[in-house]
Image (cartoon, rainbow, N blue to C red):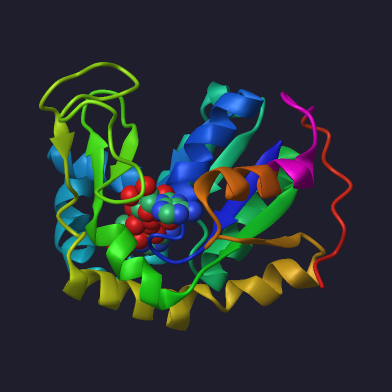
Amino acid sequence: MRIILLGPPGAGKGTQARILTEEYGIVHIAAGDLFRENIKNKTALGQQVEAILKAGTLVPDEITIKMIAARLDQPDCKNGFILDGFPRTVAQAEALEEMLKNKGIALDAAVQMAVDDEALVERVSGRFTCAVCGEGYHDTFKKPHAPDTCDKCGAQGKFTRRADDNAETVRTRLETYHSQTKPILPFYEERGLLKTVDGMAPMKDVTAAILALFGAKKASSQGVQAKKNG
Ligand code: AP5
């Protein structure tokens, strides 16, 4: 199974990708996580992109495409993948199409998570993550069962918040989404790959809606009979 999750910051791409990864046994490739890992490790790429992420604008296509192409070449992608945060421009969508064509594989679907901009600032500014296992939480929508303790791995006092999760940067990220990323929706619609789910629904309902598109657990990578959206 090969899926793209599309949506603005806070739409729930990362939340759903982590669930789908376990459900289908495929890898989760998050462009933002790869950049943040490079920043944390102070690599040349990390130094190149740090200020861009802080500002909430997009890393140049050339850099992003090269990074994702290298990730897709890894053997763990052979059984399938969920792309979260890539592509984000028409040029990236075209580059991905070419990359997959060269590998002789095709996407199953591009799933758009439809959300209201108004709700996103609250979602993103309330978000925090376990630095040990990556489990995501929220001050209102998903609190850990025991204070300051990760439900998943039990780590204590290891929660972190992203540097770009403040109201001002979120607004820039939203503007960037509308001006540069939304134009890729017609790209996938024209190819019969675009599916839309209601990203404003409770998390478990969003998961159910996505699973309903693809069927049973550990689905094969042969593709789904995706009906053209709309
Ligand atoms: P990236 O890391 O991809 O950030 P983003 O797209 O802004 O997405 P987020 O991670 O903020 O949101 P999400 O949709 O994953 O939401 P989440 O599930 O966490 O990119 C960061 C930066 O990297 C970019 O600004 C850019 O600079 C650069 N970059 C990345 N990719 C690039 C590319 N391709 N090209 C160029 N530059 C690139 O959910 C948010 C919160 O809401 C959580 O707390 C969650 O618990 C809660 N929540 C989730 N679902 C629900 C629900 N249904 N109901 C209630 N709460 C919910």
| Viewer-nearest residue: 147 or 107 | 147
Magenta residues: mostly which secondary structure? loop
> Which x, y percent locates residue 96?
60, 54
> Which x, y percent locates residue 106?
76, 46
Magenta residues, start to end: 211-220
| Viewer-nearest residue: 164 or 167 | 167
Left or right for 73, reference 218: left
Left or right for 177, reference 200: left
Q: Residue at x 52, y 59 (%)?
A: 87
**In which quadrant is the C terminus drawn?**
bottom right
> Which x, y percent locates residue 105?
75, 40
Residue 216 painted magenta: yes
Q: Quadrant of ligand 1?
A: bottom left
Residue 32 painted magenta: no
The quarter of the picture where residue 30 lies is top left
The quarter of the picture where residue 41 lies is top left
The answer to whether one can see residue 62 in this image is no
Q: Residue at x 10, y 27 (%)?
A: 157
* Residue 36 against residue 150 in the figure, above or below: below
Q: Residue at x 16, y 63 (%)?
A: 54
* Residue 114 against residue 211 in the figure, above or below: below
